[in-house]
């Protein structure tokens, strides 16, 4: 009896019970997704009294909407709001551009050229790095001087060391190494990064956040773009090379135009991650370079408790650009995510 | 030429990722004392780790231990037996030294986590940040995976409006975790939030979930799921859509019903994707820090503190050595669990596929 | 292929397709199609891509709904019945093998669904695999098989349930030419010995001619002609069928009929008992004519090329913008650009109404 409800009545149609169940699930989840956003939206139009006196759901019916919180942020604190907004835009855009640029170059070369770095040379480099960190950290040598010494030592002796043992890595290993950086929790590296920027007096600047975000997102870019470049047929480039194009020209004239979808998807994704990032911003930016997430979090610091109404406004202005992007470019973004994952 | 293409990425990662990683390791073995304008660095050997595992911070990282309860003994022994059986079976089959060492590490990690769980929670004591983080990872990712997959499957059916549903379901992933944290704090308010009437009806009007450890943890998991189910959803949706339509029809003609088709035909094919999605999600879940920081500040007590958050608090009290040591402990656990998962589950699935 | 004919014969059922219509929105994909397939018959649906043949097959399978019309399998009305209750098996163009299941699991899946006991299932799988000569590959995955082997797995999966109807959607089109020839013969033999009613969709007229008991030719969602391969070839009902069957296809000359005489540029033929008409097309098959000296045949034309195919020579003539092909014995020689004539038996020629495409038949006055 119940079984028959789950059997289609007509061919090409869904069984009535299945259909009902599906719609129920989809609508229920839509409600669960939308309601928090709706609540955020109406809270931003509430007066403090309307927030504190209990739950009011419908504007004009339950409570009188007021622009008071919006005024707080856009009239009285305009300079703070605009600065954070400006910082976020500059940092997210630049970091994304840097990350996508560097990352796709790396991904392209990994997908097209055989690299065979010597394992022992790499170990040698890591040992040098450890030495440098000890020197800087414990013996407080000058950061840049030490790094210069490390680089000099490396290039002087790299060949000699490389001859000791000739095991080589493959492209797959390099790729895996880059992607595996994603496993690092920001908390593991943020303290030394903080100290690095402190020692070169770059704390609380755009540059510090831009570089950090670019590096954090590099693994994603390399991963997604590697798969994308791999899916572009090689004979196009080979024919370009036969026509006499250099590698840079081939990349610019053939590969880039063909990978426009992949690039835009990756760009969007990285932009969203940079836009929303919190932990690094918390460490690295204190006032001048403060980004939007920090502005939002700062609403909590007042002695009067959390100013829910202004905080709602801050969150709304922060999520509007990305939500608009999500709605219009959802297809792109999901495509970008999928290139890598679905192929494994 | 090609070297020139690859170098910027490698240099950036070396300088801003590997160098800090190494520096962090060194910090973990030092004690830094700030005095006046400068600071002094002293070598501290294992003391930072010792403090976390056996010293004054043990309760914080691992939890409080007590005499094992009967239940703890039962669960611990059964799990240990299962793990030993697993290793034994591996040794009897296709034994390789590398495989054995890898499995031994997995085995040791699993065994210590099981007994940690038995000795703290199952014996009626508090567990520490490691336990809390694992709770977020296991329960959070499990929940996200189940719901995300179910939604993806529902959306992969031919029904009217499924484009709209897709866009709606995707939105939470775009919202900053800070925003999500505060939004859910608003929603969870038992006296002013939207569900206040419901709480009052249950007589919980004056109760605050923020004072109850389990309620707080579950609440963070709900907020985390709200944000990350879209990720699982989007990936699994693509997985379901990549299953060829012919196979569905062939199964239909062979007489299989919807459930049978799903279990026998669709699921085995999306399994490799599912494993990859799960791996990505688990990696990200171990890093959780924003939500507990925003929603509960780790409270009540340390009930909702993740390992990342603990490290952040240590840094905030200028204990850089401990902060790095804690971060390294997290890194170690993450790497062992994720690499085990990758080797034993994801690779196994990929290899099984022709 | 080893086939044990005595114990594998299934209960074949006839199929009756009555006034099938299929609409996709406003698009009329299948127009009033009616067919009767008798038990054990091998019927081929033939037509160019997009002619609705696959749609028709999928409607019979129950994968597409029937907008209007009725479908009977045996004496049962199955118009609205789900595929699993129709007692049919289908072979897909892509074979649709389950990639994560071994050959044995693939073949046994229909029985597994039907909850057949394990021991019984194993025997049946072995038997089916033996029938298609896959006995040694039972533990392989489809990914490890060659195209022909995959095709056999798909066949075995279809025959294991002893369905009363077999549906095949271009099953041979993914194989290379040589293998296709072998599989064609095996398919035909298997169908004959199993005696299962079969509907087979293809766009390849050679497959249709060699396999079918009867061929149904379709175009733009409409059934053009239904008949045995011989009938369809010798007596095409319209221009489309005439042009579609045969390789190289029938030669066409456009002209008109007046006073019992077909006239076109430089041609005049007796066309007795045919109605007078302005636009008429004359058709004759390349193998029904020969090349003769200029002036001695019905049509004078210039030789364009001579192609050797091994067993015969194809002479292509050009006259104005139309070309005509004549099949000649393999040792026939003629130099390109020379002038010659085509001679054919006017009794073998067909006439068609150019505007409607319909065949013009002699009226017995």
Image (tube, coloured by chain):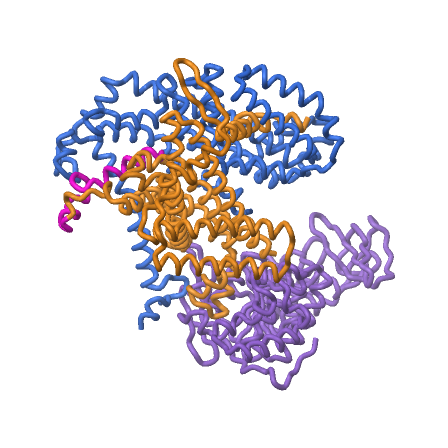
Q: Nearer the viewer, residue B20 or C155?
A: B20
Lateral position of residue B19 relative to residue A27, left or right = right
Q: Give me the chain that's blue.
A: A
Q: Give me the chain that's orange.
A: B
Q: Position of residue C272 (x, y in %)?
A: 65, 68
Tell me, yes or no, if residue C239 can be seen here.
Answer: no
Q: Residue at x 42, y 37 (%)?
A: B52
Q: Residue at x 82, y 60 (%)?
A: C310
- Within the magenta stretch, is there residue B202? yes
Q: Nearer the viewer, residue B130 or B220?
A: B130
Q: Colour of chain C?
A: purple
Q: Nearer the viewer, residue A90 or A115?
A: A115
Q: Which residues are magenta?
A: B176-203
Q: Residue at x 45, y 71 (%)?
A: C84
Tell me, yes or no, if residue B331 can be seen here.
Answer: yes
The quarter of the image holding the N terminus of chain A is bottom left
Lateral position of residue C270 relative to residue C57, left or right = right
Question: Is C269 placed above or below C302 here?
Answer: below
Q: Position of residue B177 (x, y in %)?
A: 35, 35
Q: Position of residue A15 (x, y in %)?
A: 35, 64
Q: Position of residue C37 (x, y in %)?
A: 53, 76
Question: Is A113 placed above or below B247 here?
Answer: above
Q: Nearer the viewer, residue C45 or B112?
A: B112
Lateral position of residue C239 relative to residue B31, left or right = right
């Amino acid at each position: 009896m119940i079984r028959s409800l789950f059997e289609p009545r007509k061919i090409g149609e869904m069984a009535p019970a299945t259909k009902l169940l599906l719609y129920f699930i989809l609508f229920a989840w839509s409600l669960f997704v939308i309601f928090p956003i709706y609540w955020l939206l109406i809270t931003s139009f509430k007066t403090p009294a309307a927030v504190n006196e209990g739950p009011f759901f419908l504007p004009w019916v339950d409570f009188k909407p007021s622009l008071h919180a919006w005024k707080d942020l856009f009239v009285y604190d305009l300079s703070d709001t605009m600065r954070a907004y400006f910082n976020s835009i500059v940092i997210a855009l630049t970091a994304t551009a840097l990350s996508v640029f560097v990352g796709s170059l790396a991904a392209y070369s990994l997908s097209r050229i055989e690299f065979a770095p010597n394992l022992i040379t790499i170990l040698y480099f890591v040992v040098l790095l450890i030495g440098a960190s000890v020197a800087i950290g414990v013996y407080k040598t000058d950061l840049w001087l030490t790094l210069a010494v490390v680089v000099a030592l490396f290039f002087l002796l790299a060949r000699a060391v490389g001859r000791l043992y000739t095991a080589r890595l493959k492209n797959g290993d390099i790729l895996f190494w880059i992607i595996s950086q994603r496993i690092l929790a920001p908390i593991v590296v943020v303290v030394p990064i903080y100290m690095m920027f402190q020692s070169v007096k770059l704390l609380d600047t755009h540059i510090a956040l831009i570089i950090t975000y670019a590096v954090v997102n590099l693994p994603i870019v390399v991963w997604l773009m590697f798969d994308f470049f791999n899916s572009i047929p090689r004979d196009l480039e080979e024919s370009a090379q036969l026509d006499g194009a250099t590698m840079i020209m081939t990349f610019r004239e053939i590969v880039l135009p063909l990978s426009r979808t992949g690039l835009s998807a990756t760009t969007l994704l990285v932009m969203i991650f940079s836009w929303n990032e919190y932990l690094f911003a918390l460490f690295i930016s204190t006032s001048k370079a403060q980004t939007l997430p920090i502005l939002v979090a700062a609403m909590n610091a007042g002695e009067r408790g959390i100013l829910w109404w202004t905080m709602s406004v801050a969150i709304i202005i922060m999520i509007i650009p990305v939500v608009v992007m999500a709605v219009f470019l959802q297809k792109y973004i999901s495509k970008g995510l999928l290139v890598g994952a679905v192929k494994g | 030429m090609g070297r020139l293409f690859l170098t910027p990425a490698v240099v950036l990662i070396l300088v801003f990722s590997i160098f800090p990683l190494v520096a962090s390791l060194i910090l973990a073995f030092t004690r830094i004392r700030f005095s006046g304008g400068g600071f002094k660095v002293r070598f501290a050997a294992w003391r930072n780790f010792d403090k976390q595992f056996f010293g004054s911070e043990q309760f914080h990282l691992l939890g409080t231990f007590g005499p094992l309860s009967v239940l703890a003994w039962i669960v611990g022994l059964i799990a240990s037996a299962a793990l030993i059986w697993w290793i034994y079976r591996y040794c009897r089959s296709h034994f390789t030294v590398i495989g054995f060492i890898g499995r031994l590490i997995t085995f040791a990690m699993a065994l210590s986590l099981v007994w940690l769980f038995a000795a703290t929670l199952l014996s009626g004591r508090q567990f520490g940040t490691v336990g809390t983080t694992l709770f977020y990872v296991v329960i959070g990712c499990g929940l996200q995976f189940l719901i995300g997959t179910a939604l993806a499957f529902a959306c992969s059916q031919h029904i009217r409006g499924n484009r709209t549903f897709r866009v709606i379901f995707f939105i939470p992933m775009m919202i900053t975790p800070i925003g999500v944290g505060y939004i859910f704090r608003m929603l969870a308010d038992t006296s002013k939030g939207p569900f206040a009437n419901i709480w009052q009806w249950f007589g919980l009007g004056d109760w605050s979930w923020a004072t109850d450890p389990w309620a707080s943890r579950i609440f963070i998991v709900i907020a985390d799921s709200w944000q990350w189910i879209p990720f699982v959803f989007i990936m699994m949706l693509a997985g379901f859509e990549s299953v060829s339509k012919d196979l569905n029809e062939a199964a239909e003609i062979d007489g299989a019903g919807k459930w049978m088709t799903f279990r026998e035909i669709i699921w085995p094919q999306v399994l490799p994707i599912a494993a990859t999605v799960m791996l990505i999600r688990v990696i990200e879940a171990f890093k959780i820090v924003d939500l507990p920081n925003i929603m509960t500040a780790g409270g009540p007590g340390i009930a909702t503190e993740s390992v990342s958050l603990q490290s952040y608090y240590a840094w905030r009290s200028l204990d850089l050595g401990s902060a790095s040591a804690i971060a390294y402990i997290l890194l170690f656990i993450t790497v062992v669990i994720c690499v085990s998962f990758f080797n034993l589950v994801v690779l196994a699935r990929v290899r099984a596929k022709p | 292929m080893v086939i044990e004919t005595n114990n594998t014969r299934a209960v074949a059922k006839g199929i009756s397709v009555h006034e099938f219509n299929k609409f996709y929105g406003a698009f009329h994909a299948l127009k009033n199609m009616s067919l009767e397939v008798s038990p054990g018959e091998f019927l081929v649906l033939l037509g160019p891509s997009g002619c609705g043949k696959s749609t028709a097959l999928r409607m019979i399978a129950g994968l597409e709904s029937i907008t209007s019309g009725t479908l009977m399998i045996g004496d049962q009305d199955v118009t609205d019945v789900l595929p699993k209750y129709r007692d049919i098996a289908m072979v897909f163009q892509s074979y649709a093998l389950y990639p994560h299941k071994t050959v044995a699991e693939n073949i046994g899946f229909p029985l597994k669904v039907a909850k057949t006991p394990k021991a019984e299932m194993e025997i049946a799988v072995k038997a089916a695999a033996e029938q298609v000569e896959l006995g040694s590959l039972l533990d392989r995955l489809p990914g490890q098989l060659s195209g022909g082997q995959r095709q056999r797995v798909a066949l075995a999966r279809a025959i294991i349930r002893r369905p009363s109807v077999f549906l095949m959607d271009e099953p041979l089109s993914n194989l290379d030419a040589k293998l296709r020839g072998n599989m064609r013969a095996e398919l035909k033999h298997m169908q004959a010995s199993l005696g299962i009613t079969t509907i087979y969709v293809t766009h390849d007229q050679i497959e249709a001619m060699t396999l079918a008991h009867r061929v149904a030719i379709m175009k733009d969602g409409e059934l053009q002609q239904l008949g045995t391969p011989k009938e369809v070839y010798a007596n095409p009902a319209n221009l489309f069928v005439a042009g579609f069957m045969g390789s190289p296809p029938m030669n066409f000359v456009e002209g008109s009929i007046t006073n019992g005489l077909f006239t076109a540029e430089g041609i005049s033929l007796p066309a007795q008992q045919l109605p007078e008409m302005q636009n008429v097309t004359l058709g004759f098959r390349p193998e029904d004519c020969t090349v003769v000296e200029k002036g001695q045949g019905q049509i004078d034309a210039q030789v364009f090329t001579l192609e050797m195919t091994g067993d015969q020579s194809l002479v292509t003539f050009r006259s104005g913008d139309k070309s005509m092909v004549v099949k000649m014995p393999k040792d026939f020689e003629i130099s390109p650009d020379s002038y010659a004539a085509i001679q054919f038996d006017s009794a073998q020629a067909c006439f068609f109404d150019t505007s409607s495409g319909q065949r013009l038949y002699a009226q017995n006055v």
